[in-house]
Amino acid sequence: MPDSWRTKLIHPGVGVPPGFRSLAVPTYRGSTTLFENTAQVHDGWRQDGIPYSYGLYGTPTTLELAARVGELEGAAHTVVVPGGQAALALVYLAFAAAGDHVLVPESVYGPSRELADDLLRRLGVETEYYDPLAGAGIAALLRDATRLVWCESPGSVTMEVQDVPAIAAAAHARGAVVAVDNTYAAGVLFDAFGHGADVAVQALTKYVGGHSDLLLGSVSVQDGRHHEAIGRTHQLLGLHASPDDCSLALRGLQTLGVRLARLETSTLAVARWLAGRPEIESVLHPALPSCPGHEVWARDFAGSASVFSVVVADGIPPERVLAFVDGLRLFGIGYSWGGVTSLAMPHFDIEREARRYGPRLVRFNIGLEDPDDLIADLADALPQLSGAAPGSAP
Ligand SMILES: *Cc1c(COP(=O)(O)O)cnc(C)c1O
């Protein structure tokens, strides 16, 4: 080895002993990955044969996360991308092209709607929104040009639980690909593939990450042709996920089971308490009969998670709703969910043809605080809704 210190910076002559066996998955960073010799040189997204050709297609850390998410979902292939929104974009762009028609539930995650109405529209893809409770009735909306049918169950903010098997059967009869945003179920509380999905997407940002400190997404498929479309589009778009974030998500996965169990219990306690309050007209939590699609949740889901919304009583002015949210002490005001901290967010600009709530919706994420403390905090702030001084309600 040359003995210039400058060369040693790049090609050190020392090393550590092999054989370190940690329980943690190591974080492999890398853009370049080295080939053994020129005969092995190739460039492509596929991991079969020579598994590594370029960091974009995965390092052992990102591939480990993808494989573990896919294992939990019962998928044949999973790719990890920089966020949930990137996962949605990847699916749209892998399956829809100019002239195609896409069906999206009107309860879809807001930025998904923006993507469809802006970028996809410019690319010549027509998006039509359907009532998330359409079930088999979606057949009336399917066209020869319908290439992709999205489901998101329960829907964002308005929480409608969708009859995915009925929608998938109708879509498949017309040759459309069915993609489910399975973020609420963390890929485990709802078996997307078992209920007819071709593609399952998650914002790993939420429950898999679990600590509000990363953004990641996943796209899983069963069929080789769908894998081909996703893998190729992933390569073209360069949707590489950071190995550091993947390492955090791998840690999050280890505690997903205990977190989900605790979050379910605490969330139900808070949701049921709110359901008994006169200031609240209804609670949109999939496990409560007041939630649209509750029967489908009971049929298809293995549990419930930590997000739900409330509709405040009719006639309460929007500024009172804001004062209520501002009056909470343990609930942060912020987007995203699935972490350890309780959150509250008013949603006044929700467009739903089928169910109009007006400026009366507040969405909650319940965290790992003691649910009794959360209920006490809500009890203190609820009088804001009726205009009474905090703590003076009957
Ligand atoms: C948060 C969320 C996304 C987007 O995830 P990001 O990682 O924040 O981009 C997609 N779908 C659903 C249902 C979500 O709640």
Image (cartoon, rainbow, N blue to C red):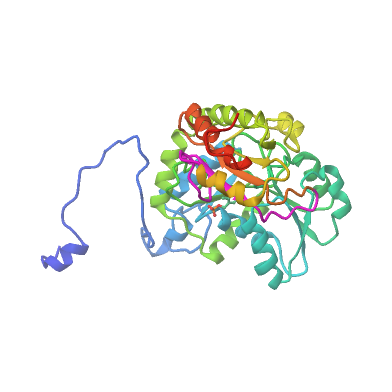
290 relative to 376 in the view: left or right: right
Q: Position of residue 90 (x, y in %)?
A: 60, 59
Report whether residue 303 is seen.
no
| Residue in front for this viewpoint, 102 or 54 | 102
Q: Quadrant of residue 344?
A: top right
Give the vertical position of 141 relative to 375 (above or below).
below
Is the residue 339 above or below the residue 49 in the image? above
Q: In the image, residue 351 lies at what x, y percent?
A: 72, 55
Residue 349 vs residue 255, the one in the foreground: 349
On the rendered structure, is 201 left or right of 144? left
| Residue drawn 58% across the image and 47% down it | 77
Provide residue 224's location: percent of width, then percent of height: 65, 50
Name the residue rendered at 52%, 33% in the picture.
Answer: 391
339 in the magenta segment: yes
x and y percentages locating residue 102 in the rendered image = 75, 59
**Count of marks, rendered view:** 0
**Which span of residues is magenta-colored?**
328-354
Q: Quadrant of the N terminus?
A: bottom left
